[in-house]
Amino acid sequence: MSLILELKNISKHYPGVKALEEVNLRLFSGEVHALLGENGAGKSTLVKVMTGAQSKDGGEIIFLNEKQHFNTPIEAQKIGISTVYQEVNLVPNLTVAQNLFLGHEPKRFGLIHFQKMYADARTVLTQFKLDIDVSAPLSSYSIAVQQLIAIARGVAMSAKVLVLDEPTASLDADEVQVLFGILNQLKQKGVAIVFITHFLDQVYQISDRITVLRNGRFIGEYLTSELPQPQLIEAMLGRSLQQHLVEKTSAEQTSNGTSAVLLSLEGVSVKGSIQSMNLTVPKGQAVGLAGLLGSGRSEVCNAVFGLDLLDSGSIHLAGKKLHLSHPVDAINAGIALCPEDRKVDGIIGPLSIRENIILALQARVGWWRCLSKTRQQEIAQFFIDKLQIATPDADKPIEQLSGGNQQKVILARWLAIEPILLVLDEPTRGIDIGAHAEIIKLIRTLCDDGMSLLVASSELDELVAFSNKVVVLRDRYAVRELSGSELTSQHVMQAIAEG
Amino acid sequence: MKNYTLVSVFSLWAIGASCAFATTVGFSQVGSESGWRTSFSEAVKAEAKQRGIDLKFADAQQKQENQIKAVRSFIAQGVDAIIIAPVVETGWKPVLKEAKRANIPVVIVDRNIKVDDDSLFLTRIASDFTEEGRKIAQWLMDKTEGNCAIAELQGTVGATAAIDRAAGFNAVIANYSNAKIVRSQTGEFTRAKGKEVMEGFLKAQNGQALCAVWSHNDEMALGAVQAIKEAGFKPGKDILIVSVDGVPDYFKAMADGDVNATVELSPYLGGPAFDAIDAFLKGNKDLPKLISTTGDVFTQETAAAEYEKRRL
Amino acid sequence: MKTSVEMMSSEALIEMPNSQQTSSNTPNDRYQAGKSTSFGRYLWPLLALALLLLANLFIDSSFFHIAYQDDRLYGSLIDILNRSAPVALLAIGMSLVIATGGIDLSVGAVMAIAGAVCANLLLLPDIGLGTVVLAGLVVGLMAGCINGTLVSFLGIQPIVATLLLMVAGRGVAQLINQGQIVTFQHQGFAAIGVGQFLGLPMPIWIVIGMLVLTQLLLRKTALGLFIEAVGCNAKASRYLGINDKSIKLFAYAIAGLCAALAGMISTADIQGSDANNAGLWLELDAILAVVIGGAALTGGRFSLFLSIIGALIIQTLATTIIVSGLPAKFNLLIKAIVILTVLLLQSEKFRRQLSGLFKLRVFKGTKVGDKK
């Protein structure tokens, strides 16, 4: 194993923020190197500096014993550092094959050799066990498939260093295994892989070495085999794991009592996404929705929030039948949704934290009765303090916050209108462990205060921790309902697998 | 079946007849951007109706490509002759060649075209813009005895009318050492812009007297009249106003004493055009390449009577 | 770690800020941080305007001179304000449309239609001024609603939807005028364009009135915030309960209304409706004004005040060219160069590179000095 890339004492400052301070990273050929840290620790910034997307303010980058200055990602790509970013950075209107080979298409007589391009594309994707039409537009496939294609593109560019920023965030378990298989093959070929993730079990499954960052500082470099999980979490958080363990007590207590049914779905079907679904959410309880990607998890959330129109069946809230044709109908009934795709459907990027928090309340109050600036500021500051949103002030644009803090702002947005039912779709996706625990605790507190929650999540441990009961979905049907002593992640997993 | 035979016999007769005089003529007009343009179109249509000519009228909406399309469709329809009032001077050679190949005579009216081979068109019927400029300049020089500080409202930059009228005007005032253009800017042939530019001129003059406004068309002059009035001067007395076109509104202003003189730009170009076409079809291959229709200078004395004539 | 939410109860969520929060724990520097960015937004357009006005002083020393004659103020500065009125009005409406992420190409044509309708109504005997003005405004509002419906409810791309009315609208105006320039004699209506009030031309008052009204409508209600939210992220706005389609419709309707006002001013100004030339290409000036005002064409933040500064910059430039005495053929070139300069000044990236160049030179200078 030889040293390919070394980052020495890298510093990067944004106005008012020290994003990186003297951070080091060593990459050896043929290793998977996990880059870990909470949100805002500086992982993404480090990747951007490493790949030329942003300039550094200090330190040096040494690639194969030569000092490098990248000014653009293209320069980094040319010498063999390729990156797959957290958000899919492809062109939705182009075909899958065009996306795979964009910028280095196979040519014949100076023109693009489409036949060869399609054939090559198929070969590359077979490695990923993806059997799809490579001449179809990228946008016709799900986010998970698009993510795999983005990774395949990085692999196809035959890089020496491959940086994967949260590659598994939208993949299901099988797809993750396929990806890991490919990463192992690349390791054999001597490629160095930087792997950024929030899933610690995956870190232990695939990585050889770990570098931990915290608050823009370098904490340490460890061999994965020598760093047990509790110590890793301690390194990431700067405090011990004990404080993060989620207690399940309150959930078990309330589930024994018989609460009145708040929300009920009876025989609800939405074409292509859910089939004759029956589901009840009791008042003051949290109901979890478990299942694989595409099982109908998110689709139930969408139907309850009036985003998808029902083909048959009915939804009742507090005994009244709901007619949902627009999210406004759901909001007026007292239902709120934190959407799965926070960036696209949740945040309003350029607007300030304050505005993002008060918007739903303002929309509810109506356009003609504007909340005063001081009132807005009070509400925003209240939630910034209560949810510990890390920001210098409420006037900062929300897009400059880390994922976890953005999620807290969106939660604050809904808490401000005091819904009776809060629907959370993947509330902890892309969020660091510290924020995980906070959000889970928040869910329990809200239940205790009498709010009901419907939570779809792929994190089974969390789901069983905060839910009073979990409904398991498979292939668009609800297959099991687990509660009480049955409610363990093992049982849920089993139900997902067997039905 | 019988009908078909009848129609084809009739059309044979029509083709035979067309050798003697035109029955169908295509007319590609610039558009309807000014009052003058509209009366020009109407005059041509009326003339055609009177002569029993089937006039195919195409409005190009100020675009040459539309004109070229129209001319091509005239050729395809097999008209007897084509009249073009061109938007711009250049770019006509290919389509004129097509017309020549189809043996269809083309008459250019109003604005000029630039082609190196003048056999591509039959003749051009137009008012001579330079002559218009000369006539109005001479009138102004006679009136002021050659002492005059002039503000010029130019037409659209690059338009033939603007370039030639300015050239004619400047050639005349060059003979008078005390006559000079002191302000010049484009008013884009519109009333609104003429008013705006005149406002600016009056401010920039800052008290220094202007003797006359020379406007490349009546619309701008009418705008300038308003600007002068609003500045507290009397147009037509404190500042003389001369122009070219002779639109009805201008005659009215002249009758009211707000403006002083104009050279009429005759909209009756249809008659001479049809005459030229007929002459050609009757075998006269020797037409002059420019048939001039430059109008006369009109002044306040006859304005009221002329306005009555021109009222719709 | 102390959990943040333990003491939170949903009843208390809204009530608590009143008891807990006072203005004392909102530090001053927070607002200053906010201010410094908005100050930057205002700095460059205002600076550009000031520079342009100063340039005029060199061309014509009496440029800033304002006299009082015939009961009204008279001078180049007044002319600039007066002449910028149509574009300023269009820019108010265009700001809203652009803030929603759209664009309205039809405003110039709507000006022509409104002008044509008013001019033809004025030819009728015994018609009241109120009726004519109302008819003009209704026409503009209708045009705006057509655009808004096409864009928001039928989902046609704004540039295409409004292009339809841009082309068809001028045709409609020509039809109404039957291809003629329709002139009228009506003191009352003419006053909209050439009248004065308290010494200032009426168009200036109309712009001020419209600016104040729109600003109140947007900022004293939540409409302004909703427009910005929809412009930044229409989908997320829909998810949080804003009716994004109605918001867009509203923006186009206001743009139509503003266009009608501008059309009436320019018609009253020359006491005639010129369907071919009224408002011709002014939609582009309006878009330019909004862009000079610092708004992004992709939607989001907007400032009506800055858009009007943009309109003033465009008009100052036009007036400068008229009084400068330069040949008319340079007009468009000069306009392009000045506007490019203004836009470059606004670009943070350009300014940084410019100052980087400057630093480099200083750095080299000291190096030479060191060698000595």
Image (cartoon, coloured by chain):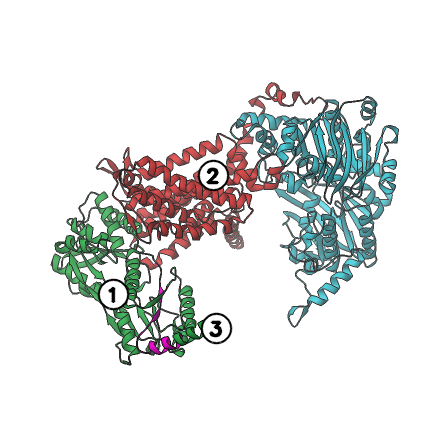
Question: Taking B266 as reference, is A129 left or right?
Answer: right
Tell me how far mark 2 sits from mark 1, CA to CA: 49 Å
Task: Residue at 80%, 58% (x, y): give it.
Answer: A127
The colour assigned to chain A within the rendered structure: cyan
Residue B43, given in percent of the width and then of the height, sits at 27, 62
Q: Tell me the shade of chain B.
A: green
Picture coordinates of residue C135, whole percent (x, y): 37, 39
Q: Are marks 2 and 1 in contact (CB under 8 Å)?
A: no
- Cα separation, mark 1 vs mark 3, equals 56 Å
Is the residue A108 above or below the residue C182 in the image?
A: below
Packing grade of label 1 (10 A; few <14, some 14-19, many >=20) is many
Q: Position of residue A481 (x, y in %)?
A: 83, 33
Residue placed under numbered mark 1 in the picture: B129
Residue A120 lies left or right of residue A481; in this view the side is left
**Residue type for callout 3:** Met
Whether residue A384 is visible to the viewer of this picture, yes or no, is: no
| Quarter residue A357 falls in | top right
> From the image, which quarter does the N terminus of chain A lie in?
bottom right
Q: Which residue is mark 2?
A: C303
Identify residue for label 3: B1
What's the amino acid at mark 1?
Answer: Phe
- Categorize mark 3 by other alpha carbons within 10 Å: few (<14), some (14-19), many (20+): few
The residue under the point 28% across, 44% down is: C123
- The magenta region covers B11-31
C196 left or right of A227?
left
Q: CA distance from mark 2 to mark 3?
A: 73 Å
Q: Which chain is red?
A: C
Question: Can residue B158 be seen in the rendering of this structure?
Answer: yes
User: Where C234 sits versus C181, above or below?
Assistant: above
Q: Nearer the viewer, residue A153 or C59?
A: A153
Secondary structure at badge 1 equals: helix
x%, y% of residue A62?
A: 71, 54
